[in-house]
Image (cartoon, helix red, strand yellow):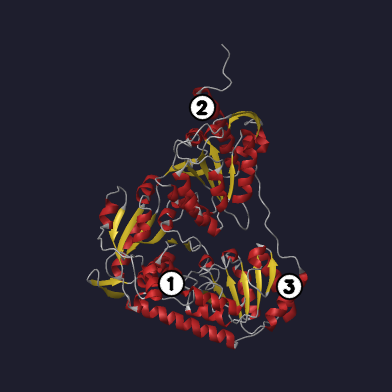
Amino acid sequence: MEKPAYPSVVELADQRQRRAAAIAQAGGIEVALESGALERYLDITVSEALVLGLLRQGVSRFFAVFGHGSTEVAEVLRIYSEAGLVRVMPVRSEIEASHAAAALRWVTGEKAGVITSIGPGALQALAASLAPASNGLGIWYLLGDETSEDEGFNMQQVPKHRQGLFLTMFGALGEAYSLHTPGAVGTALKRGFSTVEHPHRAGPYFLLMPMNIQGALIHGFNTDELPHGSIPSLPAAGDDDAYDKAADLLLNARRVVIRAGGGARHAGAQLEELARLADGVVVTSPLASGVLPYRHPRNMTVGGSKGSLCGNFAMEEADLLVAVGTRSVCQSDSSRTNYGKAKAVIHINTELADAIHYNKTLPLVGEAEATLRLLNAALKKRLGGKVKAEGSPWLSDCTAAKRDWDAYKQERYEKGVLFDKKRGRELLTQPAAIKLAADWARANGVVSFYDAGDVQANGFQVVEDERPGQTFTDTGASYMGFATCALLATAATDKPFYAMAMTGDGSFMMNPQVLIDGVEHGAKGVILLMDNRCMAAIRGLQTAQYRHAFATEDGVEVDYVALAKAVTGIRALFGGYSRDELTRALDLAREHDGLSLIHLPVYLGDDPLGGLGAWGRWNVGNWCADVQALRHKIGL
């Protein structure tokens, strides 16, 4: 009898084990390929080619929820995991997997893949991919899909007689590719490489893997088709005349505001120099927290609809806007109404569409730091080694506004506790609790993740970062449950860090399975769960707009300490009712070699000292007509 063309399960496993061992013994896939330990032409399955291709791109960590749509990939990863080449972390939710991969890339730069089955699991990952898409994080998504031969409905596919429906859906949110034939694996890897490694606008890449293609055998696969290397970043904007025009605008303006978005995170020194030369002040997005130290005299902190007194003052009074690496999200510029007195805009961005977002704009399309360096050089040349102004009225006015903001916050911190009608006793307020926890995190070298909702909004008004990388908050997608899931990144990294998830009770219950997965995989961090039994951010918005709150509260008492104690390995603590009790709880959590949870009841009510307020406009609800009318009147 002739030997079958397709090897048996045992033979296939042996072949894979030999290849994995050769790579491990060589010290990595590149060395193995260069030395010939791994042959150039291989008879391998598509799924193994994918794993090899990802290894060559430095993707060796995978957060996975395996199902019938991904068993073949799971088998390859089993063998490569046993050889020590990859680490696979099974979790209990595709949303959790996506958030953990995003946090790992965001904090450490390390790459990860998310693996799901077909259908609902893939769609959960799609929903969660809003977070990396909004924050420019390159993540691989390996998703099971219906078979390419269309023999009939596959379980969990979209039940319609149409081709490629998952590809259509996923392609609407990011770059997507269906691995329709075995020979397309090189192209699939190349498309993913250019997406997740994009130097300025990285994002999610969805690789749809038809179940019948994953295990298909490729004869003589050429490993040269596995893409690797680096993608060059965009240089500085190249128009010399534009720099001269920008210098003219800066020198003629009396009130310069520099808006630093996520694309400016690594340009702190150049931003500081521009502000000094041009007598400007800097307003940061939450993504750029720490790009200038909070106490820097020209840092006016956050602005927008949930900004600060000083940030919004600077934006609303400026006659020239310098926007750097910002997408101009609605809350960050009060739905395009925050620059009502700006006569012109200089916009530095790598994306043309973002660079020309505002009218009256001089666009400088290029990388932020490099472009700022050339702009500063042009300005210094015009100034002859001087600065535009020293002790100007503009800086004095902004400094006074920042003093008012600090005093406003301090009043709320000093009050600290208020009587909560629902609980019938005094409780810490969220601003006081977040201030204490944020200061504790900064003093102890703890990375902070902020969850969506009132915790997030109060959080970026409270934080006083000294450098980037101390605080991470998903303000783009504002995804409930992100912060707790992000703690899994501490277990996946080769660059150890301890983290704190600042979350509300609503966000925590979106993804409580992190308690189990965190213990299983060795996460190091603390969940500070601030419990007010309410979606307080939305309650406040409803009250401000309609004078009534609706369907945003509950009266169910939950013993979160008991819930956390039910998971072996969790240190569960009660945060108490005072600053001293909360500090003790945080210190006890930090002493624990693993994952902890602190349950902290916090005040809910209408006392203005219980929150930090809103200081801008927003195109939402019954405010839309007025905000839109103002935007059109401004015309920027």
Q: Is residue 59 visible?
A: no
Q: Which residue is mark 3?
A: 243
Instruction: Bin the neighbour count of mark 2 within 10 Å (Cα to Cα): few under 14, some 14-19, many 20 and up.
Output: some
Report the front residue among 63 and 38: 63
The Cα–Cα distance between marks 1 and 2, rounded to whole angstroms, is 55 Å
State the residue lying farthest toward the left.
424
Q: Please indicate whether residue 69 sits to the left or right of residue 525 in the image.
A: right
Identified at 49% across, 75% down, the residue is 617
State the residue lying farthest toward the bottom.
393
The Cα–Cα distance between marks 2 and 3, rounded to whole angstroms, is 61 Å
Q: Amino acid at mark 3?
A: Tyr
Q: Which residue is mark 1?
A: 462
Q: Is residue 62 visible?
A: yes
- Relative image position of residue 252 (x, y in whole percent): 69, 83
- Relative image position of residue 414 (x, y in whole percent): 34, 78
Q: Amino acid at mark 1?
A: Val
Q: Which residue is mark 2?
A: 13
Compared with residue 472, is residue 63 higher up or lower down, i.e. above or below? above
Q: Please indicate whether residue 622 sits to the left or right of residue 136 in the image.
A: left
Q: Please indicate whether residue 31 sits to the left or right of residue 491 in the image.
A: right
